[in-house]
Structures are given as structure tokens and as C-alpha cells.
Amino acid sequence: MSETPMTSMSPMSPDAEPADLQREALRLDGADKLADRRDAFVLDDSPETVYLDGNSLGALPRAVPDRLAHVVAHEWGSMRIRSWTESGWWEAPERIGDRIAPLVGAAPGQVVVGDSTSVNVFKAVVGAVRMAGEERDEVLVDATTFPTDGYLAASAARLTGRTLRPVTPAEMPAAVGPRTAAVLVNHVDYRTGELHDLPGITAAAHAAGAYLIADLCHTAGALPVELDARGVDFAVGCTYKYLNGGPGSPAFLYLRREHQAAFDSPLPGWHSHRDPFGMTADYAPARDIRAGRVGTPDLLSMLALEAALEVWDGVDIGAVRDKSLALTDFFLHCVEQYAPPGRLECVTPLDHDRRGSQVSLYCEDAEPVMAELISRGIVGDHRRPGVLRFGFAPLYTSFTDVERAARVLGEVVG
Amino acid sequence: MSETPMTSMSPMSPDAEPADLQREALRLDGADKLADRRDAFVLDDSPETVYLDGNSLGALPRAVPDRLAHVVAHEWGSMRIRSWTESGWWEAPERIGDRIAPLVGAAPGQVVVGDSTSVNVFKAVVGAVRMAGEERDEVLVDATTFPTDGYLAASAARLTGRTLRPVTPAEMPAAVGPRTAAVLVNHVDYRTGELHDLPGITAAAHAAGAYLIADLCHTAGALPVELDARGVDFAVGCTYKYLNGGPGSPAFLYLRREHQAAFDSPLPGWHSHRDPFGMTADYAPARDIRAGRVGTPDLLSMLALEAALEVWDGVDIGAVRDKSLALTDFFLHCVEQYAPPGRLECVTPLDHDRRGSQVSLYCEDAEPVMAELISRGIVGDHRRPGVLRFGFAPLYTSFTDVERAARVLGEVVG
């Protein structure tokens, strides 16, 4: 362990002692307006454990086990097929979408839950390209994207006869032009934790007549998104990170209301038909958010997600953002105190306007370092090459967690 | 109630009394080699209830609630992200696929679980068309198919520049030709319960150089399919009917081993990458069954399915077929005794070789008839126009159930 500050990693004062930082953590926890939310989650590990991987898989909300047991025993086991109508199964994708909507700045009726993020990226890119018309022959994709978005965008471009052009998010405003059909961008870079300028990129796309598709996997539930206000056309996101829906819980798709009637899905399953039980040979899409559905959704995963979303009742997403920034600031400050200088390099922007809810630290031996951290109860993850990722879920991460994690990290790399 | 026989509906002797049929049901139940399987399911409704909608949503296997509770509390709640490796989450799609494989006549390593049936139809049709090459410009689709298959096949044809040609399964052997890239056929017609000649259609497709894609939604778990032996190229199916996986449980995709290295998925998500954690910008597909995966799968639904599949341990699918035919024969016989002549018309073939595991009866007022049946505890469903559907799940349906259902049906239509 070292008390020498890490080079310019945080704007805070250096040279604090562990006892000072622990006191500061307790003070911050005491002032935390979201502190009571922690009780809504199952976090009964040993006191040594700090879970900082909620940006990969959110912790279990306490409401889930009983709700899911009821769904299985009563809705499936006893009511069986009647639950499609009597337990509200059929409408679950839109109903749960409407619970997510306020967290991403969407009015009701524009978010539907189902399928994986990858599948929803495909729907959104093909849908956007078709709306843009034949003369727009390229799709811009975030070159730093989580790979699956790029793979699916490439497939969508190939199948619709467009060219895929990877550019960095910073280059997007200059790159978008009259040939651009759609722009697909991640709101936060999964590796560095950088928050991209979604409003600016959206405005540039619209100025060029292109559609904007946002991937919100790393921002839904972590910070305000303002889809409606910013004019975003399409958005996708997963629900198992900051939304705590459980492993592989279904993704969501945002279809801006004005685009719903024209949305021409490449996956026109019967659940998106305007009269699904008409069972007609001809396809006629629903002219509302149901146009984003495909086939029969995974109800058990979906209803677990619905229960998980109860933790957001009464929560102000602005307060979530404030706490997220305070957590990452405090983590950077503590790491600066505890880690040897030059040992770790922060690759997450220090500027609040460019930081998501994670901190990524570069070190050459990230893989063994993370393994050792995990063995000592500090759970983050690593991404090749050399990136230690720590996610901060404001609903259940405390400042005491943060100080402990930084202290153990300092020991491991010291 | 009437004891007059229905016109030529079954090959059995007419004019039995209810007491005779009830004795016969008890005798058949006593001789049923699968009778002990019923205890593996939750069927603790009132004794008046008979569930004949397992062809829409299978009953709850008793192993599911505890297993799912463990997954939620321990694997998600306590182990969290570590479960991706330590609880076998990552390999679940192939592992569970291998549990389904023997039920559809597939050797291991050719079935993967995930996504909806609709999404898997899309993967299979695009994949088959791409393998068939540019000069084959048409896709034959079962004109009597469950609509979603037709919708997705149409989308696949549109995106790959092919023409979709709907023909009946009976017409397929004559219709398939040198321009045909792929043939998509349902093994059983969801409405009539007719079992199509999959081996004959497959042989005709191959003789013409086309690929065969089978939809097994209504046969997986109901009768032997023999995918490997019959040379079927691709198959899809749901797991929530005769496989009892729960509402919207993930579908399966069969990719014949010889096609796996060439399979060019239209949904190349990161889970199908040969090095998913390499996180490379370039896509390189796995050359095995993992090529059929897309994004992060719904683990809760998937692991519930895994527990549900335990009911098949030690079950011979040939015995399942024998019982299925005995159940549907007995049902037809009982209906013939109990329903007024001419009131119901059987639209399911009487020929065993052409019958799935359901019986569909036509009557003009099917919707109110089914509503009344359900109110009296006899749960089937109806499909417009005028079809009463009764599904017979051989693992948990008894002959006593069957007699009771037919008797109440006779009362309702009498």
C-alpha cells in the first residue's frame, strides 16, 4: 500500500490517511439521499465484499424472488394458459416498457421490452435505414462500440445494401452527411466509461437528415437520458446492468412516437401484428410501440424484470446522477491516495460531462490484478487489453464500499 | 348429452355407455407405462379440471420452482457475475440444447437454445438461402403455416432478394425445383393437427438441391422427429408446449453439423463469435453450434427450461408417440359417443401417420363452446374460424382426463 498520489487522476487534495478517507466515506454515506435504496437489494455477502460490477450484472432486488415464485407457482402452475389474458402476460412488453420509459426520458407508449440488445440493434438499424430511403447509402457506426452493435449494424447494412462506416463518436458530427441513413452510437463507451455527447451527435445527425440510434446499455438507470427532449429517433438498451433485471433479462427498444406508424421491422413476428390472433397469412404491423415486438417473449425473465423495476419507485434520476459522480470522484480520489504513482492510469474522463457511471483503470497486468481483487472480495471485471472496470450502481453502492475497494486495490497493486 | 355416434369420426365401436368408457379409461390408465410421469408435474387443480392446452403452454414440472429459486437467490443474488463462469451460464444454450437433441433425433452439438421461434426462423431461412447461392431465387413456405413463420420467411426473402412462394405441404414435393433455395415447413399444422410428411418433403427438397427447414413447435416432445436420420438441414421449435419450459421459454435451433462451418447468420451477435471476449471489431463466427447464438440469453427462462427438461430422463419418445395416438384415438372415440351427430366435424386426420398430438374439431360456435368448456374446467383453446383445439401431452394427460373432457364437451354441445 502506498499513500503517494497517483498522477493527476482526480481533482481532489492528495495525502489523506486511510482513517481520513474512511471518515469521509461515512460522512458521505450519512448525507446520501439514496442510502435507503440499498435495503431494496440482496447484498448480504460478507462485509469484506464490494460489488462493483453492476455495470455488467446488477444486484438482485429483494422483490424479485417472491414475485417470480408467484409467477411460477400461480400464474404458470395453476392458471397456465389463462395467464396470457388474466395475468397480463400479453401486454407485459409494453407495460414494462412504460416502467423503463421515465428512466430514459420517454413519455409512455414508446418503449417495449423483449429480445436481446443485439436483436434490437438489428431491428433499429434496418428500420432506420428503410425510413431514410434508397438514396442514403451509408450507416455510421461508433468505431469504439461494444462489438455486437457493430456486428449487427454490419449485418443490417449488408442486408439492406448499405455501406457501414465506422467512425469515433467525436468524429460523427463532421462525418454525417447527405448519404448517411442512420448513426448508431453508444451513449457510454463500455471500455473507457466515456460518456459521449448524445445531444450533439443527435443534432448533427438530424441536421444532415439522418436518424440517430442510441445504445443506452451503460446509461439506462445510471444517468438522465432525455430521449424525447433530445429528439433521439431509436434507442436500445439492456436491462441487466443498472436496471438490475437479472441475467440476460430482456432488452428494450425505444421507437419515437412519430416513427411508429412507418416502422418497417426486419423481424415482423406475430406479436407485432395489429391483429395477432387473426392469424392471417398477410402481415400488417401494429402502428404503435407493439411494432417493435417479434415472437413470444420470455415471460419468466420479463416478469422478474418487472419486479426488479420497483426499486425505482420515487427515485429521481437526477439524484442518481449526482450520486454516481460523487461515487466515481471519491473512488478516483481514494485510488490516488492508495495506489503507487504510475501504477494505474485512469482512462475514464475526469470531466463530469464526459464520464459515465464507471471508472476504468489501465494496467498491464489487469487480468491477474482483477483475479486477486475478486479473491479479496472486490468484484469488478477486466476487459482486454489491460482494463480494470469498476461500475458504480448508485442505488446500492455506498461510499464505504468505494473506500474499501480502492484500499484493497492499492494493496494488490502496491 | 347424447350417445348417438358422431359420423365416422373414429374407427372404434360405437354405442358405448359412459360407465363403459370410464371403465375403459381406468383400464388404459392402468396399462400406461408413462403414468408415473404425471407426478412430475403440478396438476393440483380441482378434480374437475382437465388441461388439454399443453400444445399451447405445457404444465409446470415440479422441479422448476426450487431450481429457479436457487438460480435467483444463489446464482444471481449471491454469486452474481461469477455465475457466468462458475454456474455454467455461458454454456447454458448449448448444454440445454443437448438435452433437447435426443428428443428430436439429433446427436449432441447441433441444437442451441435461445431467442424466440420467430427469430430462429429468420436465422434459419437467411442462413439456408445464403448457403444455396445466388442462382436459387425462391423460398417455398408452407402456405398453411403458423403465420409468424410466413412473416419471417417473407422478411428473410425480401432482405436477401428472393421470392417467397407459399404452397401447401402436400404440393411441396412437386413445387420444389432448381430455383428453390430453401423449403420451410411445419411438421404439424397448428390448426388442424395434421402431421406432414417431413421425410418425404425433405427428400424432395434434397433431390432438387434445396435446403429443408422444419418447424417442430408441435412435434418436439410429442413424437419422434429423427432430424439426423432424415437429413433435415435446419430446424426450429419452441420449448413451451410439449417441452414444458414455461411461458415464452427460449426456442431452439438445430443446425445440422455439416452446415455449421458455413452458417452465415443474419444476426451475428457477440455470443456467436469464435472469441467473444476478444471484443474485436471484426466478426468471426464460431464454426460449431454456437454460430446459432446471438446476444445475451434470458438466463432465468433458460434455466427454468433446463429444470423442466428433467421430466424426460429415461423416457422413450417412441412410447410417448404410442400414448399420444392412444389418447387421441380414445378422445375421438369418446366424442363420437357423447356428441350429437353432425354437431362437430373432426378436421384432424384419422390416419395415424398424418396425425400430430392434438385433435381439432370444427363447429361454428367454437368460441362460446370453448368458453363454456373452460368454465367447466376443460381447458383447450380455439382458433378462428371455428376450430376447437385439444392438445394431448402424453407425459401428464390420462385417459380418465380424456373421457371426462369428451363427456363435458358432449354436454356443452348437446
Image: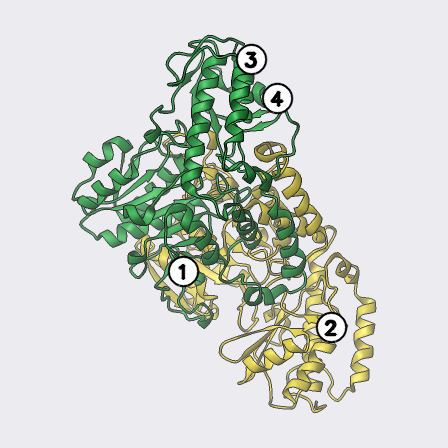
Chain colours: A yellow, B green
Picture coordinates of residue B34 (x, y %)? 50, 38
Report the disc number at residue B375.
4
Left or right of residue B109: residue B398: right
Residue at numbered disc 2:
A401
Picture coordinates of residue A333 (x, y %)? 70, 81
Q: Are marks 2 and 4 on the same chain?
A: no
Q: CA distance from mark 3 to mark 4?
A: 13 Å
Please, which chain is the residue tagged with disc 3 on?
A: B
- Which amino acid type corresponds to the residue marked 1 in the rendered image? Arg
Mark 1 and mark 4 in contact? Answer it, CB < 8 Å.
Answer: no
Q: Secondary structure at mark 1?
A: helix
- Which amino acid type corresponds to the residue marked 4 in the rendered image? Ser
Q: Secondary structure at mark 4?
A: helix
Residue at numbered disc 3:
B411
Q: CA distance from mark 2 to mark 4?
A: 56 Å
Q: CA distance from mark 1 to mark 4?
A: 45 Å
Left or right of residue A43: residue B375: left
Q: Residue at x 80, y 79 (%)?
A: A22
- Which amino acid type corresponds to the residue marked 2 in the rendered image? Asp
Q: Are marks 1 and 2 on the same chain?
A: no
Left or right of residue A49: residue B301: left
Mark 2 and mark 4 in contact? Answer it, CB < 8 Å.
Answer: no
Please, which chain is the residue tagged with disc 2 on?
A: A
Q: CA distance from mark 3 to mark 1?
A: 52 Å
Q: Residue at x 64, y 83 (%)?
A: A9
Alpha-carbon neighbours of circle 1 within 10 Å: few (<14), some, or many (≥20)? Answer: many
Please, which chain is the residue tagged with disc 4 on?
A: B
Residue at numbered disc 1:
B290
Single out the residue that lies furthest toward the left: B178
Q: CA distance from mark 1 to mark 2?
A: 38 Å
